[in-house]
Image (cartoon, rainbow, N blue to C red):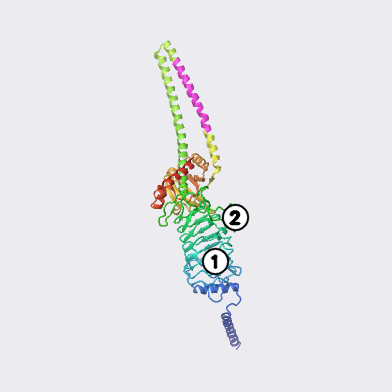
């Protein structure tokens, strides 16, 4: 009887638990915003975004309620109970973002929806807290909203590879923290807005493959290190400061190829804006293009080259020729000295043998008188021997001086940096084919990039030509590094580990003279065939070799 009552009580308890569970489920369904770990404002915002994207198949995501931070929704990153990052690159997303699809995020720092199929226009209301914002590789159309001016904390803005049209908004005056701006492969047009001069932290700017026009003067005071403006409709002169950018790509425009105007030419008609801030590295220079001295024809927007590019090409060639000359002198002079010393020793031994034979013959066949004459001849030979001995004696300190000089030379290389093979492999991606710039008779040139994004040109000398004695190679590196000229590529370091022979130069992005001469691009070759251009090339080459 007791067992029966206990069984009935157990069934009753289980039934109550089931009813309680059903009640909690219904309660959660009726009140989806029941307190969760994730901030309720962020839950509401991400539900709205999910609906705008067409409710895609994303792990954990739902259009109603949920706990993104606690349940670890796909691509969602949180700090404490706030959503700070949404990274869904290449997630096959579709749909269209509405104006308020992103407006309710109040702690979002990173939003990466790149490489999807999202269409529509870029929302006008954006989270002001964004630091990284990427919509690259989608189907966004329309214009770039002027509301980007409210993204005062933005450091990385990427809208490349969309269908954006219209002019760039003049809305960059508040984006002083922007480091990277990528707007390439759209259909943007018009001039670069004046407010771009306030982008005082901008180091990377990619706007290639658009229809942008006008001049580049607004960029001349920015701290750019990577600028790609290729395949647009820019015109006028390239400001001198931009020519110093380590990674500059400007082909496919209508930029003038003449040298900057001389002081005698009329000044620019435009005056700097009174609101223009001072330059980062000095006063602003307005280089509005006056009437050019010479301008070759443009062939269907094809690439035109700056004469400075040819000058740099000649400079690089000159530095290589100088290095070869030093190498030949270093190798040939010691060889000549060895041959000279060997010749002296041979003469000395021949004279000794001649003297001995002469003495022996006189002792057996000659008279006393002849012996006296022979004695005179022997004395003459002895005098000659003393001369040779003095020559031989003079040679010995020369060898010691040479040794001391070599030791001093080894210390000279402290003025250039010694790189390890491991570091250069890291810089050049293990000397991959992607980093190969060109080949020459001594080896291959590779593009190198260090952790600070600084670019180098690394010459890896071929194994059969790298059997240069260590001391000779160090002397070459030191001698080349001492050559300081604006028209000669600067040697910054070398590498001798594991028998390798590598030279590290400062990187110049311009095309080489050889590339221009043998180019199939008629616009490049036309530049060389003009008489005035040849004179300028000759002058620049003379300056480099002066």
Q: Which residues are magenta?
A: 376-401
The mark tally for this picture is 2
* Main secondary structure along the magenta-highlighted residues: helix
Nearest the eye: 470 or 128? 128
Instruction: Please name the residue that numbered disc 2 is placed on.
Output: 278
Q: Is residue 385 magenta?
A: yes
Q: CA distance from mark 2 to mark 1?
A: 25 Å
Q: Tell me where residue 166 appears, x and y as whole percent.
A: 49, 65
Q: Residue at x 54, y 62 (%)?
A: 156
Task: Please say if 133 is above or below 24.
Answer: above
Q: Which mark is residue 435?
A: none
Task: Please say if 269 is above or below 34.
Answer: above
Q: Neighbour class for label 2 at 10 Å: few (<14), some, many (≥20)?
A: few
Q: Tell me where residue 406 appears, x and y as whole percent.
A: 52, 36
Q: Element at badge 2?
A: loop
Nearest the eye: 102 or 257? 257
Q: Is residue 11 magenta?
A: no
Assess whether mark 1 and mark 2 are in contact (beta carbons under 8 angstroms): no
Instruction: Please name the residue that numbered disc 1 is placed on.
Output: 146
Task: Please say if 228 is above or below 111.
Answer: above
Task: Please say if 465 is above or below 437.
Answer: above
Q: Tell me where residue 328 appears, x and y as whole percent.
A: 45, 38
Task: Classify the position of the N terminus by image quarter.
Answer: bottom right
Q: Tell me where residue 332 appears, x and y as whole percent.
A: 45, 35
């Amino acid at each position: 009887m007791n067992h029966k009552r206990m069984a009935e009580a157990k069934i009753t308890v289980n039934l109550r638990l089931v009813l309680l569970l059903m009640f909690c489920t219904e309660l959660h369904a009726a009140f989806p915003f029941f307190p969760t770990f994730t901030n309720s404002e962020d839950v509401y915002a991400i539900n709205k975004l999910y609906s705008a994207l067409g409710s895609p198949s994303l792990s954990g995501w739902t259009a109603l309620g949920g706990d993104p931070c606690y349940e670890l929704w796909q691509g969602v990153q949180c700090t404490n109970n706030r959503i700070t990052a949404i990274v869904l690159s290449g997630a096959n997303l579709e749909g269209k973002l509405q104006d308020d699809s992103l407006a309710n995020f109040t702690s979002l720092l990173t939003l990466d929806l790149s490489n999807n199929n999202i269409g529509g226009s870029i929302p006008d209301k954006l989270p002001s807290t964004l630091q990284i914002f990427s919509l690259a590789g989608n189907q966004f159309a329309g214009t770039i909203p002027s509301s980007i001016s409210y993204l005062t904390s933005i450091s990385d803005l990427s809208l490349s590879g969309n269908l954006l049209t219209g002019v760039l908004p003049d809305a960059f005056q508040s984006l002083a923290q922007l480091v990277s701006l990528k707007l390439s492969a759209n259909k943007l047009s018009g001039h670069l807005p004046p407010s771009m001069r306030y982008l005082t932290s901008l180091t990377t700017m990619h706007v290639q493959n658009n229809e942008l026009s006008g001049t580049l003067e607004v960029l001349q005071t920015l701290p750019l290190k990577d600028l790609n403006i290729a395949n647009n409709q820019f015109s006028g002169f390239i400001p001198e400061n931009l020519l110093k950018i380590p990674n500059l790509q400007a082909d496919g425009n209508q930029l003038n190829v003449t040298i900057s105007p001389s002081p005698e030419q009329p000044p620019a008609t435009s005056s700097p804006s009174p609101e223009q801030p001072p330059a980062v590295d000095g006063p602003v220079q307005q280089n509005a293009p006056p009437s050019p001295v010479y301008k070759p024809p443009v062939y269907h927007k094809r690439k035109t080259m700056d004469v400075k590019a040819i000058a740099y090409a000649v400079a690089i060639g000159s530095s290589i020729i100088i290095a070869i000359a030093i190498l030949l002198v270093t190798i040939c002079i010691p060889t000549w000295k060895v041959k000279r010393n060997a010749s002296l020793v041979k003469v000395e031994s021949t004279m000794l043998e001649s003297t001995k034979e002469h003495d022996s013959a006189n002792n057996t066949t000659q008279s006393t008188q002849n012996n006296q004459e022979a004695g005179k001849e022997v004395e003459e030979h002895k005098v000659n021997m003393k001369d040779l001995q003095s020559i031989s004696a003079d040679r010995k300190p020369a060898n010691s001086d040479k040794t001391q000089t070599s030791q001093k030379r080894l210390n000279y290389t402290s003025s250039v940096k010694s790189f390890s093979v491991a570091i250069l492999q890291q810089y050049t991606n293990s000397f991959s084919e992607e980093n190969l710039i060109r080949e020459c008779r001594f080896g291959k040139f590779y593009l190198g990039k260090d952790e600070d994004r600084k670019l180098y040109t690394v010459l890896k000398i071929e194994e059969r030509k790298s059997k240069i004695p260590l001391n000779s190679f160090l002397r070459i590196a030191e001698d080349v590094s001492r050559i300081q000229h604006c028209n000669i590529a600067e040697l910054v370091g070398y590498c001798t580990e594991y028998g390798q022979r590598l030279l590290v130069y400062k990187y110049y992005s311009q095309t080489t003279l050889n590339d221009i001469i043998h180019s199939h691009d008629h616009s490049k070759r036309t530049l060389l065939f003009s008489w005035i251009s040849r004179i300028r090339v000759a002058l620049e080459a003379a300056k480099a070799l002066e």
